[in-house]
Image: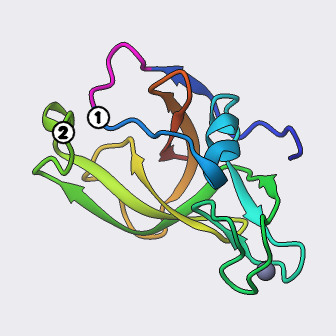
Amino acid sequence: MTGAESGPVEDRRDSWEGPVPVPTGANSEFWAATLEGELVHQHCEECGTAQLYPRAVCTDCGAVDPPFEASSGVGEVYTYTVCHVPGEPGFGDRTPYVVAAVDLEEGPRLLALVDCDPDRVEIGMALEVTFWQVSDEAALPVFVPQ
Ligand SMILES: [Zn+2]
């Protein structure tokens, strides 16, 4: 990792009622980085594939334990949905909320909350990452308009 700062971390441990990630195996390094405000992805040294979510092997060539590197945290909306019915426990008082597939400028695509007016979101909208710390072990990447 480069140590580059991807985005600010906001402590939401006292108010968060949604699901909490449990770091394990290949994703432990990803979640540890989120606590430092750093969004990381795996970048295969064998074939150059960039991937998220973290996996034990490269999805393209099968290389084991592709190393992590920092992302700028900048991306754009590939597609999105506005949730009017909460999809998870603890989201009842958040509706309507936006979930988007976000294409990072380094290549990987991830699903994440977008913290903005649902009427404002559109495909191709430029986003940057922030983090909501929801436990002592994990901060959720949450995107906001740039
Ligand atoms: Zn590879």
Residue at (65, 54) in percent of width and height:
26
* Rendered image quadrant of residue 60: bottom right
- Report crowding for label 1: few under 14, some 14 to 19, many 20 or more residues within 10 A (C-alpha): few
Q: Quadrant of residue 129?
A: top right
Which residue corresponds to the image point at 56% horizontal and 37% vertical from the top-left?
130
Q: Is 136 part of what is drawn in magenta?
A: no
The amino acid sitting under disc 1 is Gly
Residue 45 is situated, as x and y percent measured from the top left of the image, at 89, 73
Q: Residue 56, image x and y in percent?
A: 68, 65
The answer to whether any part of residue 120 appears in the image is: no
Residue topped by disc 2: 89
Q: Position of residue 114 (x, y in %)?
A: 40, 48
Look at the numbered disc 2 and give the secondary structure of its residue. loop
3D distance between C-alphas at marks 1 and 2:
6 Å
Marks 1 and 2 close (CB-CB < 8 Å): yes
Q: Which mark is residue 74?
A: none
* Magenta region, residue range: 12-17
Residue pointed to by mark 1: 18
Magenta region, main secondary structure: loop
Nearer-N-terminus badge (1/2): 1
Task: Indicate the quadrant of ligand 1 in the picture.
Answer: bottom right
Residue at point 64%, 29% (across, down): 35
Q: Is residue 93 above or below residue 73?
A: above
